[in-house]
Image (cartoon, helix red, strand yellow):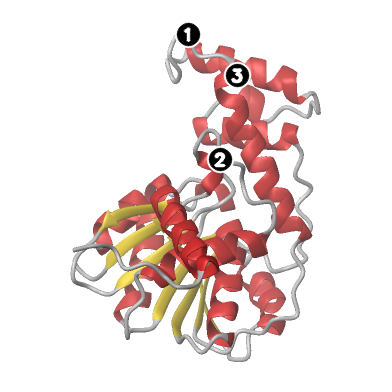
Amino acid sequence: MARLMSADPAVESAEDSAAESARLCEVPFHRGDKHPLYYVHEISGSVLHFAPVARLLADQRSVIGLQSVGTHPGHPADRTIEEMAERFLAVVGRRADAEPLDLVGYSVGGLIAFEMAARAAAAGIRVRMLGLIDAPAPGTPSGITPARVVRMIAHGLGIKSVATSESQDSEGLLSMLVAEGREAELFPDDYTEADLRPSVDLQVITGRAAEAYRTHRVFDGDVRLIGARGQLAAKTAAWQPYVSSAILGSEVDAGHYDLMKGRALGEVTAIVRNWVSE
């Protein structure tokens, strides 16, 4: 059957753009006949760390990750939370059905998911649940710099000498990280700073977008929040002005960067399972 063409070139262009965004941004962890849960990426732009959670949710929901378009070489990253939310809403809209949206975002992803939820609700689309996994509220300073991003990557890899360094020389830290990563066999022998630099650049862009994000939007819907160790009360209070209902929160005994690891990952998974089952 021939493809039906829109009479409006602008509409057709928007549809083509949404289709391209879907190709680049969608990561279908588990796609089936169950209503989907959409998971929004954190500062790295990737959603792969959510794979263990998605696997354990497969009996309850289809799970679709939304990764940054900037994870693909040759595709510039969106530079504001609003641009990211608009792109992802176009992706979600292509697969929308009569059921309401369920959105979850970790860290920076929580800001993107919030902007998506508020925009969708303003457009008359019901959002059943917005899940925020230790997400900073709008206006929270982050102090993101290239050096800090390199240290964050080192923390995730377990390279303590770089993770705990106080140096602000991002290029020097990057060289140390790559050298020690090769020595520890975390990277291939031919891995170089040039291979890792795009990831650093993307995280700087995403982090600065989060720090610059300001909004007057208020979301009228069900909000769930996971707080890292000692952070639940402060994060709940910070988010409350942007939510018209009470926030249901849970605290996990782990630091922000360790929520998706080990025992903490099991706790986060159990909490999210409860979110999607209610």
Tags 1 and 3 in contact by the CB under 8 Å rule?
no
Q: For the point 67% across and 76% down, which residue is it?
A: 239
Report whether 54 appears left or right of 247. Answer: left
Q: Position of residue 261 (x, y in %)?
A: 42, 46
Question: In the image, what residue type sits under mark 3?
Answer: Ala
Mark pair 1, 2: CA separation: 25 Å
Q: How many marks?
A: 3
Q: Which quadrant does the N terminus fall into?
A: bottom left
Q: CA distance from mark 2 to mark 3?
A: 17 Å
Q: Position of residue 274 (x, y in %)?
A: 34, 75
Q: What mark, if any, has residue 146 been given in the picture?
A: none
- The kind of residue on which mark 1 rests is Asp
Query: In this view of the protein, which residue sits in the foreground, 50 or 36?
Result: 36
Q: CA distance from mark 1 to mark 3?
A: 11 Å
Q: Residues within 10 Å of mark 2 (few under 14, many from 20)?
A: few
Nearest the camera: 243 or 12? 12
Q: Where is residue 2, by image quadrant?
A: bottom left
Query: Residue 244, percent across and down?
Result: 63, 91
What number is the disc on residue 75? 2
User: Which is nearer the eye, 18 or 49?
Assistant: 18
Q: Amino acid at mark 2?
A: His
Q: Position of residue 213 (x, y in %)?
A: 74, 63
Mark 3 crowd level (few <14, some 14–19, many ≥20, 10 Å Cα):
few
User: Residue 190 bears which disc, if any?
Assistant: 1
Residue drawn where x is 59% and y is 78% of the image: 119
Residue 263 versus residue 9 in the image, above or below: above
Return the disc, 1 or 2, that comes first in the chain's sequence: 2
| Residues under numbered marks 1 and 2 in contact, where contact means CB atoms less than 8 Å apart | no
Pointer 2 with pointer 3, Cβ within 8 A: no
| Residue at which label 3 appears | 194
What secondary structure is found at the residue carrying circle 1?
A: loop
Residue drawn at point x = 71 percent, y = 54 percent: 209
